[in-house]
Image: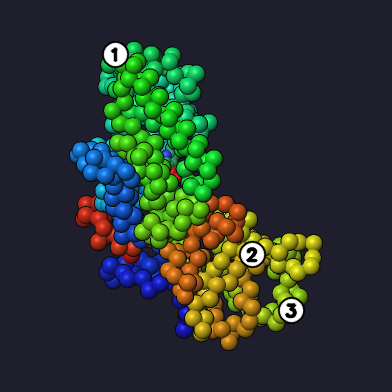
C-alpha cells in the first residue's frame, strides 16, 4: 500500500478520477490547481478593491457609486497555472479585465472564446516594430503605449484596420522600466492628442507600475510609493491639459490592492494575489489576507533505498549522509522548473556552507513529516535524506509527496511556494512561473466554478 502526503482530492466524477490516474501514468508529478481557490481569491480581491479607504468613511468614492474594477493578471501562462482555465476562474470570481504581458497571450484568450462582452484585455510587452497591432485592434484588445515608436505604430495599424485603437498611456513614475518619463511627457501627450483627434487612437487609460509597494516594513520604500503616486497624479493633470483625460486610471498591483485602498482608482491589477499569495512574506501570510494558494505540486517517489553513513548524495558531493539512513528520489528536477538553487548543502565543517534545501512533505507512519532536498537538484530528479529507516517510517516507492500546496497549518506540515522561494533565494512568483509544461496541470472543482460552456474550453483530460 502506498502512503499519500497529498490531500484527498475529491473528484467531480468517475471521469475525473480516471483523468487523475491517467496523468499519474503519464508523468510522476502533477500540478493540481484548485479552481475554487482561484475564484474565491478573485472574489476576495474584488471585495478588497471596493472597500472604502481608511478615513474616507461613508464619504468614500465607493459610497458615491464608484466601482473599482479588477484585472486578473494572467501573464506567463497565468503564473504557471494555465492561461485559459485561470482566466475563466478569474472571470467567475468577478474580474472584468484580464491582463497579459505578451500580445500573443492576449490573442490566445480571445481565440479561446473570451469575447469583449466578458472581459477587456490589456497587453503591454512587445516589439513595437513587428508585433501584430492590427490583430490586437481587430480583436478588441487594449494596448499599452509608452514609447513614441509604439504610439506611431499603433496609430498606423489603426488606420489600416479602419478602427481606432484603445490605448493605455504608460507613464514611468519611478519604476524605471516601461512608460514615458516626465521629460518625455509633454511632447508625447501632445502627439497622442493629435492622433486621438484624427480618430486613430482612443486614449482610454493612464497607468503605471509600483516598485516597492510590497515592503510596508521599510519606511523609505513607503515614501517612495507616495512619491510615485504624486507623480502619477501629476501625469493625469498633464494628460487632461493635453486634451486626453484618462477615463480609466490604474496603478495597484497585488501589494497595493491589499494595502493601499487610496490608490485603487478605477481598476486594480492583482497577479500573485489571484494565485493565493501575498506579494512578499514581509506583508504577512496568504491567510492574513484570506487568500488560498491555488496550486499543489506533488510527485511520486521513484526509488527508496538504505544508505550507509558518509555517502555523498548527487553531483558535487555537497551533502554527506550522517548516519545509517534511507534516501528517496523525487523524480522532478530543474528541467521541470525545480530551482537548482534549492539544493541542500549539508557538510558539517567542510568547504561548503550548510544550507537547507527545498522542503518536501512526506507521509510516514508517524504522520506527515517535512524532509529537504539533500544534495544538488539534478535535471530530472532530486534526493531527500529521510534521516531514518524507510521501512520504519513506512515510506516506499510510489508514495505521493508534496513539494508545495496551500500550507494547511503547522500540524499538517505542508510547505508553500514561499518556503521554496526562501530555499531557492527567490520569490514565490518564480517558483510557480518556472514550472514546465511537461508536468501535467490538473484542475480541481472546475465543474463547480465554471459554466458548462466555459468548462468546454478546458482540455477534458485536465479536469478532475
Ligand atoms: C505582473 C504585473 C502586475 C501584477 O503584479 P503582482 O505583484 O503579481 O500583483 C501588475 N501590473 C503589471 C504591469 C505587471 O507587470
Q: Which mark is residue 197?
A: 1
Indicate the colouring scheme: rainbow
Q: Which mark is residue 345?
A: none
Contact flag, marks 2 and 1 (Cβ < 8 Å): no
Mark 3–mark 1 distance (CA, rounded to whole Å): 78 Å
Q: Secondary structure at mark 2?
A: loop
Tell me where residue 413 appears, x and y as whole percent.
49, 72
* Residue shown at 69% from the left, 79% from the top: 307
Tell me where residue 259 appears, x and y as whole percent.
40, 47
Q: Which residue is mark 3?
A: 309
Q: Earlier in the sequence, mark 3 or mark 1?
A: 1
Q: Quadrant of ligand 1?
A: top left
Q: Secondary structure at mark 3?
A: loop
Residue 76 falls in which quadrant of the image?
Answer: top left
Tell me where residue 184 appears, x and y as whole percent.
48, 18
Q: What is the quadrant of the C terminus in the image?
A: bottom left
* Residue shown at 58% from the left, 87% from the top: 392
From this view, report whether residue 43 is shown above or below residue 188.
Answer: below
Q: Is residue 45 visible?
A: yes
Q: Secondary structure at mark 1?
A: helix
Q: Judge by depth and name the residue closer to the eye, 257 or 37.
A: 257
From this view, report whether residue 463 is shown above or below residue 147.
Answer: below
Q: Which residue is mark 2?
A: 356
Q: Judge by depth and name the residue closer to the eye, 66 or 157.
A: 66
Tell me where residue 462 appears, x and y as whole percent.
36, 59
Contact flag, marks 3 and 1 (Cβ < 8 Å): no
Q: Is residue 99 visible?
A: no
Q: Residue furthest bottom?
A: 392
Contact flag, marks 2 and 3 (Cβ < 8 Å): no
Residue 139 falls in which quadrant of the image?
Answer: top left
Amino acid at each position: 500500500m502506498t502512503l499519500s502526503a497529498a490531500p484527498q482530492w475529491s473528484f467531480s466524477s468517475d471521469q475525473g478520477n480516471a483523468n487523475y490516474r491517467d496523468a499519474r501514468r503519464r508523468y510522476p508529478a502533477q500540478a493540481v490547481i484548485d479552481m475554487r481557490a482561484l475564484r474565491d481569491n478573485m472574489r476576495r480581491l474584488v471585495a478588497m478593491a471596493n472597500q472604502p479607504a481608511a478615513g474616507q468613511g461613508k464619504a468614500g468614492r465607493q459610497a458615491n457609486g464608484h466601482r473599482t474594477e479588477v484585472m486578473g493578471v494572467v501573464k506567463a501562462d497565468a503564473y504557471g497555472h494555465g492561461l485559459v482555465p485561470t482566466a475563466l476562474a478569474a472571470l467567475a470570481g468577478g474580474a472584468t479585465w484580464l491582463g497579459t504581458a505578451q500580445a500573443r497571450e492576449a490573442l490566445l484568450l480571445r481565440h479561446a472564446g473570451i469575447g469583449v462582452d466578458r472581459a477587456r484585455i490589456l497587453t503591454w510587452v512587445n516589439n513595437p516594430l513587428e508585433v501584430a497591432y492590427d490583430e490586437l485592434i481587430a480583436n478588441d484588445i487594449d494596448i499599452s503605449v509608452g514609447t513614441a515608436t509604439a504610439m506611431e505604430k499603433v496609430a498606423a495599424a489603426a488606420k489600416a484596420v479602419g478602427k481606432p485603437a484603445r490605448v493605455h498611456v504608460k507613464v514611468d513614475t519611478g519604476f524605471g522600466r516601461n512608460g514615458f518619463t516626465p521629460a518625455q511627457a509633454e511632447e508625447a501627450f501632445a502627439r497622442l492628442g493629435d492622433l486621438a483627434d484624427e480618430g486613430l487612437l482612443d486614449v482610454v487609460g493612464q497607468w503605471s507600475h509600483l516598485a516597492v509597494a510590497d515592503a510596508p516594513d521599510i519606511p523609505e520604500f513607503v515614501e517612495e510609493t507616495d512619491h510615485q503616486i504624486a507623480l502619477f497624479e501629476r501625469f493625469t493633470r498633464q494628460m487632461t491639459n493635453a486634451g486626453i483625460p484618462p477615463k480609466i486610471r490604474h496603478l495597484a498591483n497585488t501589494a497595493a490592492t491589499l494595502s493601499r485602498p487610496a490608490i485603487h482608482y478605477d481598476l486594480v491589477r492583482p497577479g500573485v494575489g489571484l494565485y493565493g499569495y501575498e506579494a512578499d512574506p514581509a506583508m504577512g501570510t496568504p491567510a492574513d489576507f484570506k487568500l488560498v494558494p491555488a496550486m499543489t505540486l506533488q510527485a511520486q517517489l521513484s526509488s527508496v533505498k538504505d544508505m550507509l553513513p558518509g555517502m555523498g548524495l548527487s553531483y558535487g558531493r555537497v551533502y554527506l549522509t550522517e548516519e545509517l539512513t534511507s534516501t528517496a528520489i523525487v523524480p522532478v528536477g530543474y528541467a521541470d522548473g525545480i530551482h537548482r538553487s534549492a539544493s541542500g548543502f549539508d557538510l558539517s565543517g567542510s568547504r561548503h556552507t550548510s544550507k537547507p534545501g527545498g522542503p518536501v512533505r512526506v507521509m510516514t507512519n508517524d504522520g506527515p513529516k517535512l524532509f529537504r532536498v539533500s544534495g544538488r537538484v539534478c535535471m530530472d530528479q532530486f534526493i531527500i535524506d529521510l534521516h531514518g529507516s524507510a521501512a520504519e517510517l513506512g515510506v516506499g516507492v510510489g508514495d505521493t509527496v508534496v513539494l508545495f500546496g496551500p500550507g494547511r497549518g503547522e500540524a499538517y506540515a505542508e510547505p508553500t511556494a514561499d518556503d521554496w522561494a526562501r530555499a531557492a533565494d527567490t520569490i514565490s512568483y518564480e517558483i510557480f512561473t518556472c514550472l514546465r509544461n511537461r508536468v501535467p496541470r490538473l484542475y480541481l472543482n472546475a465543474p463547480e466554478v465554471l459554466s458548462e460552456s466555459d468548462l468546454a474550453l478546458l482540455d477534458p483530460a485536465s479536469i478532475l
